[in-house]
Amino acid sequence: MPFLTDRIQDTEREMRQKRALDEENCISARGHSGSPRLASSRFGFDVAGIEAELRAHIIGQDHVIDELIRYLRTISADIGDPRRPLASVMFTGPTGVGKTETVRLLARALYGDADAVCRVDMNTLAQEHYAAALTGAPPGYVGSKEGTTILNQEKIEGSRNLPGIVLFDELEKASDEVVLALLNVFDNGMLTVASGERTISFRNSIVFMTSNLGTKELDRLRNRRRFLQGIPPKSNRARVHDIMINVLLRRFPPEFINRIDHIETFNWISAQQIPDILAVEVERLNARLRKHSCQIKLDRTAIDFLAKKSYDERFGARGIRRTVRKHLDFPLADYLLDSVGQEAETIGDIRLLARLEGTRIIFERMHERQHR
């Protein structure tokens, strides 16, 4: 009974919106205990806290973070067109430089959960006949009234005081039919399913897209001028933008590019930034080790060894993660398991120092004075 399913979904959506409105009213009744915001604005997220989170974990992309914070401040002020998405942003640049991670960190800062993103991997929509997964089956086919099977409406809509986060990952791999379906999303914030009986609203969403297009062109420019180390001058940044627009226009129709609010290009990761990225990876490892009451610290020999092994600008941070897993995670797992076996008890409340011995990293317990 499709009509009954529609009524149930509509009722559930109304209940979610009512709960969100009740929560917002409670926050307003408590006064201005949180971040300052306009009295008439419906958004109440902490822009300064989001900025701190992004700068702590996204290395070497300060210009992108600067622009993203400007978008968020505009959204927080609630002065945008209510008939369109809150913002549509495309992240371009090489692989492994933090495009997807930036969106996940934004979701974690807003919702406390990096998986609060409605992420669509465009690899799964590369064939024309897969477009039905986004827009629903045509009229007369099974599932035509239910519409999309890959969009999470709850994540897209967000709440009354928080925006939804949507990510179309590796957009260049989507079929032309999918790209055309997104035109209406950027234009009026609505996606109508193929049957025409249901719509999904993106008007309370920040829509992100990522693309690796233009990497070869930017690499040639970088080899000539070597300007993508750190933040390049404005003239060079404008040159990068022009190159990216030309590359994108070879893949997407002009009317599609013209509807995107912002296009930002990420830098390559430089060798000087590797220690900072390693520090982020070690921080994440320590977060996972807390359940074992165990923490590790790297000395300079271990940091230099991992930095030398991991740096390959072609692969960005993903190469660093593989190196950390091979040269740090694997020996650490052996150490923990061997220690448990020798002591016949669970490892607990220990601090380990990772250092280089020969060509491998070893671990030793730290004395109290070492980890102060």
Image (cartoon, rainbow, N blue to C red):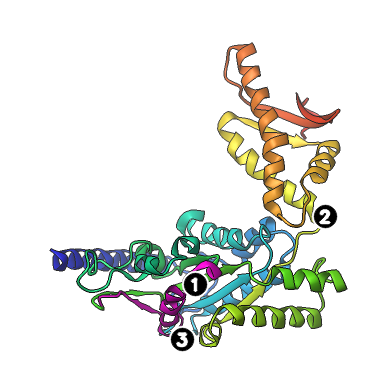
Label placed on residue 206: 1
Q: Main secondary structure of the magenta part?
A: helix
Q: Nearer the viewer, residue 210 or 73?
A: 210
Identity of the residue drawn at 74% across and 78% down: 240
Labels 2 and 3 touching (C-beta < 8 A): no
Q: Residues within 10 Å of mark 2 (few under 14, many from 20)?
A: some
Q: What is the three-letter code of the residue carrying label 2?
A: Ala
Where residue 12 sits: x, y (%)? 24, 63
Return the residue at label 2: 271
Task: Give the Cα distance between marks 1 and 3.
Answer: 13 Å
- The reply, left or right, for residue 230 in relation to residue 289 is right
- The reply, left or right, for residue 186 in relation to residue 262 is left
Q: What is the three-letter code of the residue carrying label 1?
A: Ile
Asked if residue 158 shows in the view, the reply is no
Which of pointers 2 and 3 lies earlier in the amino acid sequence?
Answer: 3
Q: What is the three-letter code of the residue carrying label 3?
A: Asp
Task: Give the Cα distance between marks 2 and 3.
Answer: 42 Å
Asked if residue 369 shows in the view, the reply is yes
> Which residue range is magenta in the image?
171-195
Return the residue at label 3: 81
Please identify the quarter of the rendering in which residue 204 is found.
bottom left
Identity of the residue drawn at 77% across and 68% down: 219
Where is 68 relative to 108, above or below? below
Where is 298 relative to 223, above or below? above
Labels 1 and 2 touching (C-beta < 8 A): no
